[in-house]
Image (spheres, rainbow, N blue to C red):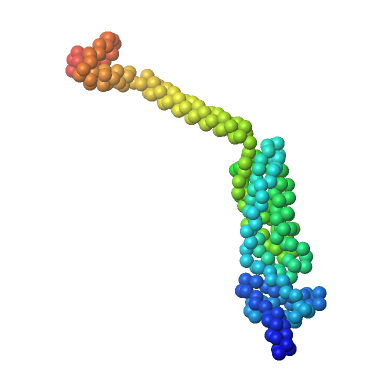
Amino acid sequence: MTIAVLVVVLTFLSLAVVREYERGVVFRMGHARPLYGPGLRWLIPLVDKMIRVDQRVVTLTIPPQEVITRDNVPARVNAVVMFQVVDPLKAILAVENYAVATSQIAQTTLRSLLGRADLDTLLAQREDLNNDLRTIIEAQTRPWGIEVRVVEIKDVEIPESMQRAMAREAEAERERRAKVINARGELQASDELSQAAETLSKNPASLQLRYLQTLLELGADQNSTVVFPLPVDILTPFLQRSVTPPP
């Protein structure tokens, strides 16, 4: 009876289930053996030891890091790293804890890279910084069998005094652009008026007709009376035409 119970217990201890998204790294008497894939696996009790390695994409949150940008602006930045174990054997043999090691590498790389960038780059070119971070981090984790899928800078916090300074700078820039647009409009209107004046100066009759048209427009309002002095020289061309005898 005792032997039967012992056999059942050893049999129970010798069986292991490896899930579809896992791989089993097996050590027999301290030596690594080929990986175990998904399914029910048999281990030699007290001889084999199996470590399950999850091969799904892991999301790693990088805690906020204090950085000083190239233009001496203090900032507080956090990020997220998504990585995947592509070689379970390397991930177990090359580093003690691949998740912690990846997190430490990501933190130091984040501080180092952002310290070489100015604030404008950090705010406006975040996608380029994300790609650079991913490339640098993966270059160090690849020997561990770790592939970095995504690195994303989440939040960038700067001091309130700097935020107010940036708001004033943005307001000044908007005012400058408005003044430039207004000046361009006035310049364009001045050019068009100059062209119109030049055209009218070449044709006195057109100038006189324009004057009369203005009088008609001003007199269109029935509730007001507008009196304009009418120079005689404006009517001269019309009077000359009326008194000139036919040939």
Name the foreground residue: 91 vs 15: 15
Res. 191 in view? no
Q: Could you tell me residue 194's position as x and y percent?
A: 42, 22
Q: Could you tell me residue 215's position as x and y percent?
A: 26, 18
Q: Is residue 35 above or below residue 194?
A: below
Q: Quadrant of the C terminus?
A: top left
Name the foreground residue: 244 vs 70: 70
Res. 39 in view? yes
Q: Could you tell me residue 31's position as x and y percent?
A: 80, 75
Write the residue at 22% across / 21% down. Answer: 220
Quarter holding residue 55: bottom right
Q: Is residue 184 above or below residue 72?
A: above
Farthest residue, direction front: 1
Q: Quadrant of the N terminus?
A: bottom right
Q: Could you tell me residue 138's position as x and y percent?
A: 70, 58
Quarter holding residue 227: top left
Name the foreground residue: 70 vs 41: 41
Write the residue at 69% across / 43% down. Answer: 66
Name the foreground residue: 21 vs 235: 21
